[in-house]
Amino acid sequence: MAVVSAAKFNTSISPTWCPGCGNYGIWAALKQALFELNLEPHQVLISYDIGCCGNGANFTRTYAFHSLHGRAIPPAVGAKLGNKNLVVIAVIGDGGAYGEGIQHLIHSARYNVDITVLVHNNQRFSLTTGQATATTPSKTVTPTTPFGEIKKPINPLLLSLDSGASFVARGFANDGQHLAELIKAAVKHQGFSHVDILQPCVSFNKENTNEWYRSVIYKLDSHKYKADNLLRAKEKAEEFEQNGKLPIGILYQQERETYESQIPQLAGEPLCRQSLEGIDCLAKL
Amino acid sequence: MDKEVAIKIGGEAGFGIKVSGLILGKTLFNAGFKVFGYSEYPSLIRGGHNTYQLNTAKNDVFSVTKKIDILVALNQESLELHGQELNNGGVVIHDGLDIKDIKDIKDIKDININLMDLAEKAGGALTRNIVALGAVMNILGMDLQLFNQELEREFGDKGVKVVAMDKKAARLGYDYLKKFKIGAYLKKEAGSKAGDYIMTANEATAQGMIQAGCKLYAAYPMTPATSIMHVLSAKQCDHHLVVHQTEDEISAIGTAIGAAAVGVRAATGTSGGGFALMVETLGLAAITETPLVIIESQRTAPATGLPTWTEQGDLQFMIRASPGEFPRFVIAPGDALEAFYMIQEAFNLAEKFQLPVIFLLDKLLSESDFVLENIEQHKVKIKREGFINDNELERMRDYKRYELTKNGISKRALPGQLAGVHVINSDEHDEYGYSTEASDMRTKMMDKRFKKLEQMMAEAPEPQLYGPRNADLTVVAWGSVKGAVIDALREIGDKYSVNFLHLTYIWPFPAKRVKKVLESAKNVLLVENNKTGQLADLIRQETGFELKNRFLKYDGRPFFREEVIKEIKKYI
Ligand SMILES: Cc1ncc(C[n+]2csc(CCOP(=O)(O)OP(=O)(O)O)c2C)c(N)n1
Ligand code: SF4
């Protein structure tokens, strides 16, 4: 019997995340978004990083490419170039996206490849038991920073805005409805979409809890805030550093030609369907 | 001409030494002479010393000699560095340089031409090289017709004026030589072309990739692999091929693997340093059973090493690179024509066995100019294997991407196919692709991947034995050393009893064949362009044979033919 709800994106395997983990909320929102976009599991390829979030590869029924730590983006780019008909999403933790593989985020934003990058930002390396990442606030005590983190955290949204991302948003794991809308918008956006998702990690992050998030976040009002201005977007992205508030919603969206659309070889059939008959490499020599 | 002629052009980097050399090479090729072009240059754009050496003969030539017959010294350094390389009776063409240092070499013909004067007469200082080449054409005893054709081909897009200027420069150099009365070096009448093409192994590899249906090449520039990217970039629009320059090599292989995962024939390419960055993803290709072709053109390493020089130092690295164990192919062609065929095989093998195939070149192959003769463009057929169509998938109902099969190969459903949804998994996994840490499944999956080995071994072509079946000496080498050995054997002739075992499909190791040859060999000489004799060690590991006679070189230079001849003669 055909499943006509987001449950069609469930596999037979139940999630293994800790009870109360923000990954549940993101997972549900992702499935809801795909469902509301009328997508079928086979039309979607998700490239997963290694981390708690990456374990979603086993629980989410779409084509999945479970890659390496920090390396979910390059295969996503390759898959999109190889089969432009696929909806391609990368799921990464803050450790992978803003640490190990930060260059891939910066550059694929710059290329404006039509993929969506969902960063499960729990401000910790959770799968490896809670060490500090590039987004862990200064002074935070973790197993690798027993005297408090000395380094200054980076601002991932400023980073992708400066890198040329054409869609930049921030969501909250435990506001499913809002997050599903963001993911839908990100997937629909033609070009590189970056969604930083604030994700409570109940096991290793005792500071940025669900309650804490709820006390600092607010939703951008689409009537008052227009996401078409880079300078304004950067101001919004920096609000936490300025006044301790975390706006969620679409900070920036710009229509720009995608990388793929500017490659004439990609104009017809996807690369994976190109015929390999009758090739004559020596023709013009 | 019976004798081979070696011509070296030397000058400052940025003087267009390589372009000049290749113009001469193509001219000779079109006149019916075989050529081998070898260039040396430092890792600099301007300044520094560049040379291009052309060895040309009526018969095949696939290697570079230490001794030369004609030296075009465009600067003092060329004279200092290469004057001593001249054979007795050799010619040096120069522009008012002090040649007293090489006067002690007997019979040097000193051709002092005011190149700059003639260049300016022709219309511009930039034609200085061409004046010198005109002079060389005279020495070779050829007319300028074919040379002029090459000038048109090379500079045609710069306009008729430039071409006319170059032709004039060549004529001035040519005529100037008349008064020297040097006997012609090449006595053959101008004939038809000496083969089909002149190409570097990189160019041949790139053409082979296109022929094999490669549709995505993701790479980051690194000498000596870069020209593959250049050739593919220039041709990409004709073949629905996307060349994607990535932010680094990790991304290059990651992008290639992503494309391969959706069913595209995809590849990446780099040198040893870039490959080092790719290693983790190499293992990803292995455990996810994704077909992937990785080209590695070796240079003198480790680290930055000698970026523009040659070495065979990466063999063991290619075989072992990655944490964990898995089967892979390592293929190392010995010349440009082999590169053309073997890269096509590489794509077939990658797809058939669903694993990484490493295609190992080196600077000598990647940047030397080879004659390709009797090229069979369609010799290697594209074999698309291991896929499953939608009907089959739907009938199956319970598709298992990593099904445990007899031969270890399971069918690939591709993302986008309705009934094939699965995880392409970097974690150890079960037959469906779901992560598992169960001991029995781990063992089964390892065994599954390794089951392919037997068939891989059976399908890889065996090493070739050149020369008589039984000989007093058996030379053993792999990859690019082929040219020097083959030419050496031809030169020393039949009166010496020597044969040559050349390895190309090196991993999985062709132990049976190698063992058989070594068992009947009277004496064995290994020739390898590295410090430790990596192939020799591999042979010991795989066959138990200890190769004690190791002729090794690791100074960044390839083997010169004379060295190989001298070494061979020590053993016979
Ligand atoms: C190259 C490499 N380095 C380190 C690791 C170990 N490792 C696995 S997951 C992880 C961090 C995960 O953190 P994050 O990306 O934030 O994801 P999370 O677990 O928080 O969801 C690390 C360091 C690895 N698998 N590979
Ligand atoms: S460790 Fe943290 S991120 Fe990982 S599953 Fe548990 S709560 Fe979630």
Image (cartoon, coloured by chain):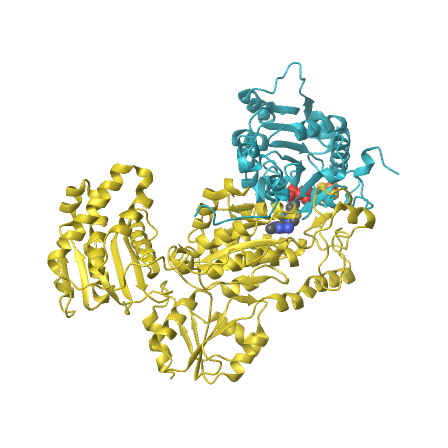
Judge whether A138 appears above or below B7 on screen: above
Judge whether B175 appears above or below A28 on screen: below
Q: Is residue B539 left or right of residue B186?
A: right
Judge whether A137 appears above or below B254 on screen: above
Q: Is residue A209 left or right of residue B3?
A: right
Q: Quadrant of the N terminus of chain B?
A: bottom left
Number of callouts? 0
In this view, the residue farthest toward the top is A223
Residue found 64% across the figure and 31% down from its top: A195
As drawn, the chain in yellow is: B
Image hue for chain A: cyan
Q: How far from the left and from the top, in percent, is residue B458?
A: 63, 69
Residue A121 in sight from this viewpoint: no
Q: Is residue B187 left or right of residue B370?
A: left
Q: How far from the left and from the top, in percent, is residue B107?
A: 14, 69
Q: How far from the left and from the top, in percent, is residue B286?
A: 64, 56
Q: Is residue B51 left or right of residue A139?
A: left
Q: Quadrant of the C terminus of chain B?
A: bottom left
Q: Quadrant of residue B190?
A: bottom left
Quarter of the picture for ligand 2?
top right
Q: How far from the left and from the top, in percent, is residue B348?
A: 60, 57
Tell which of A272 and B449 is nearer to you.
A272
